[in-house]
Image: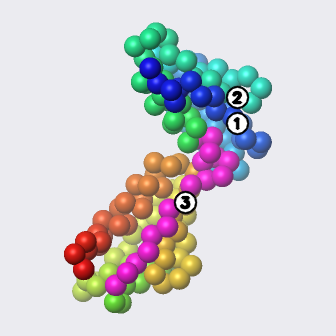
Amino acid sequence: MSRIAKAPITVAKGVDVKIDGQHITVKGGKGSLELDVHPTVSVKTEDGVLTVTPVDDSAWAMAGTMRALLANMVTGCGEGFQKKLQLVGVGYRAQGKGKVLNLSLGFSHPIDYAVPEGITIETPSQTEILVSGSDKQRVGQVAAEIRAFRPPEPYK
């Protein structure tokens, strides 16, 4: 039995949640996200609180998963998510130019990374990269893709 699924989700002010059958749309100041809820899970909203319940006892694990995804959607549309990457190495530099991130990582050529929709990348200094957006999964995926260009050396 999932303990996570039992916890209600408090919807912050400025975040709007619409439930249309098994399709949920969350809109807020940072953007809009959509989710199709698994058929074995039902979602209800009352007075700014979302509750997730399984249809039968065998669906508690899926209810916990859906509750976590919904909580991330509400948080993302209200506050947003952010990952910070730091470049450590001689000559390693990052520079944001519009929707392209230019990376110099010690290769013979610079790397140009096209930033996907819904994600913003800032470079406060030449060795720091801030990846932010409303979708937690996409922010983490973009940060992982940038990190994969030159993974950290564990033995140095």
Relative image position of residue 114 (x, y in whole percent): 42, 66
Instruction: Give me the disc on residue 49.
Output: 2
- Residue 80 painted magenta: yes
The quadrant of the picture occupied by the N terminus is top left
Of all residues shown, which one is farthest toward the top? 56
- Residue 24 painted magenta: no
Q: Which residue is mark 1?
A: 11
Q: Which residue is mark 3?
A: 82
Asked if 51 appears above or below 128 in the picture, the reply is: above
Span shown in magenta? 73-89
What is the distance, in whole Å, between disc 3 and disc 2 at their CAs?
25 Å
96, 155: nearer the viewer = 155
Circle 2 packing at 10 Å, graded few (<14), some (14-19), many (20+), is few
Identify the residue at horizontal 35%, vertical 67% (top origin).
147
Task: Tell me which corner region of the image, top left, top right, bottom left or bottom right, holds residue 61.
Answer: top left
Q: Tag 1: residue type? A: Val
Circle 2/circle 1 CB separation < 8 Å:
yes
Circle 3/circle 2 CB separation < 8 Å:
no
Relative image position of residue 93 (x, y in whole percent): 41, 84
Work out whether residue 20 can be spotted: no
SS at mark 2 in the image: strand
Q: Tag 3: residue type? A: Gln
SS at mark 3 in the image: strand
Work out whether residue 127 can be spotted: yes
Circle 1 packing at 10 Å, graded few (<14), some (14-19), many (20+), is some
Asked if 20 appears above or below 130 in the picture, the reply is: above
What is the distance, in whole Å, between disc 2 and disc 1 at their CAs?
6 Å
Q: Tag 2: residue type? A: Val
